Image (cartoon, rainbow, N blue to C red):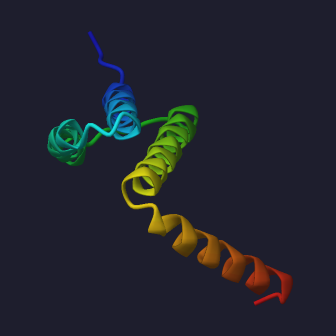
């Protein structure tokens, strides 16, 4: 039986979603514990090498993009000042794009 190569990525995404829920409910201890557990999941991903087709690769990057979005949401909840920094960086990027830099 062959396992789904994206199963671990989906599991990590689900775990990150739990972290977001902990942050939203201001369960900081739970968030820290979940953060430690996610480190274990990430380590497992690094140890697991497999070849995936183009469709699976696109799905993998969609999952990773969502994980990054969740991480940003968690940062904005736990460290509200990061919203200001993100806004400044977004504005700077928009200016560069507008000037062709």
- From this view, report whether residue 4 is shown above or below residue 89: above
Quadrant hosting residue 31: top left
Picture coordinates of residue 18, whole percent (x, y)? 34, 30
Quadrant hosting residue 37: top left
Q: Residue at x 21, y 37 (%)?
A: 34
Picture coordinates of residue 50, whole percent (x, y)? 31, 38
Picture coordinates of residue 80, whole percent (x, y)? 45, 61
Q: Residue furthest front?
A: 26
Residue in front for this viewpoint, 56 or 80: 80
* Picture quarter with the N terminus: top left
* Picture quarter with the C terminus: bottom right
Residue in front for this viewpoint, 50 or 15: 15
- From this view, report whether residue 38 is shown above or below residue 14: below
Q: Is residue 2 left or right of residue 83?
A: left
Residue in front for this viewpoint, 9 or 72: 72
Q: How many marks?
A: 0
């Amino acid at each position: 039986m062959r396992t789904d190569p994206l199963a671990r990525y989906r599991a990590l995404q689900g775990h990150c979603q739990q972290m977001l829920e902990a942050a939203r409910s201001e369960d900081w201890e739970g968030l820290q514990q979940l953060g430690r557990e996610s480190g274990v999941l990430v380590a497992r991903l690094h140890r697991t090498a497999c070849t995936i087709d183009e469709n699976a690769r696109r799905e993998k990057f969609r999952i990773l993009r969502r994980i990054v979005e969740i991480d940003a949401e968690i940062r904005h909840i736990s460290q509200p000042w990061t919203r200001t920094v993100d806004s400044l960086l977004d504005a700077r990027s928009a200016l560069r794009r507008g000037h062709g830099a």
